[in-house]
Image: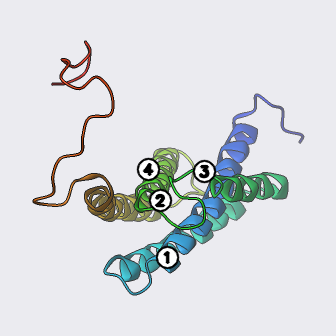
């Protein structure tokens, strides 16, 4: 039976393939970030996250097989292209990593993990009425994604501290514009 664009199984296939493509891009980013932090305190935690996120992608593939949803290779290629394009973002430096790179990469990885949390939450909900889905397994994957998000938030906050806070005892930077003026309306004072 051919599935139409409005058929819930077709839509589920699109949804799962979008998450599979995002997982591929996310894995590439977390592995690159882990390599950049090899030899630091964050390195082992990022490497462990890369392994877990790879396992999560494998779990998603198993779910897709159980539901008879084929992987869409074109979507996966597009996801990888987007991941590569993301490397071209300006970071305040031309040829080297900036401390801001850490913040932006950790935020991007965390966004991916938050997406995974919603994927597992959705599949957990669907498992109530679909015997092809294992509700307990989806619950475990959801719990792991929540732990991953917590780890990433701790790493992100540390990166924010390194990149965006002044060093203790450092002289405050001179204001760039409008020295001595009150803040514009809408900005916190």
Query: Alpha carbon of mark 1 to alpha carbon of mark 4: how far?
Result: 23 Å
Query: Alpha carbon of mark 1 to alpha carbon of mark 3: how far?
Result: 16 Å
* Residue 114 disc label: 4
As drawn, 121 above or below 31: above
Q: Residue furthest top?
A: 185
The answer to which of marks 1 and 3 sits earlier in the sequence is 1
Residue 146: give x, y in percent of width and height. Answer: 34, 58
- Per the image, label 4 sits on a secondary structure element best described as helix
Residue that badge 1 annotates:
36
* Residue 122 disc label: none
Residues marked 1 and 2 touching at CB (< 8 Å): yes
Query: Is disc 1 surrounded by few (<14), some (14 to 19) or many (20+) residues within 10 Å?
Result: some
Quarter of the view holding residue 49? bottom left
Query: Is disc 2 surrounded by few (<14), some (14 to 19) or many (20+) residues within 10 Å?
Result: many
Quarter of the view holding residue 73? bottom right
The answer to which of marks 4 and 3 sits earlier in the sequence is 3
- Per the image, label 3 sits on a secondary structure element best described as loop
């Amino acid at each position: 039976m051919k599935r139409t664009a409005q058929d819930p199984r077709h839509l589920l296939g699109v949804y799962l393939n979008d998450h599979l493509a995002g997982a591929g891009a996310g894995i590439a980013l977390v592995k690159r970030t882990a390599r950049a932090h090899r030899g630091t305190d964050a390195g082992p935690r990022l490497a462990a996250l890369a392994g877990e996120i790879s396992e999560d992608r494998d779990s998603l593939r198993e779910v897709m097989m159980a539901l008879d949803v084929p992987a869409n290779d074109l979507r996966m290629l597009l996801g990888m292209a987007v991941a590569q394009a993301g490397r071209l973002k300006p970071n305040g430096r031309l040829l080297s990593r900036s401390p801001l790179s850490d913040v932006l990469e950790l935020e991007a990885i965390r966004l991916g993990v938050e997406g995974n949390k919603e994927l597992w939450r959705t599949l957990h909900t669907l498992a109530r009425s679909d015997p092809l889905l294992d509700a307990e397994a989806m619950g475990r994957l959801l719990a792991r994604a929540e732990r991953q998000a917590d780890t990433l938030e701790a790493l992100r906050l540390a990166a924010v501290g390194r990149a965006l806070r002044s060093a203790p005892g450092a002289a405050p930077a001179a204001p760039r514009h409008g020295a001595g003026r009150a803040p514009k309306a809408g900005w916190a004072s």
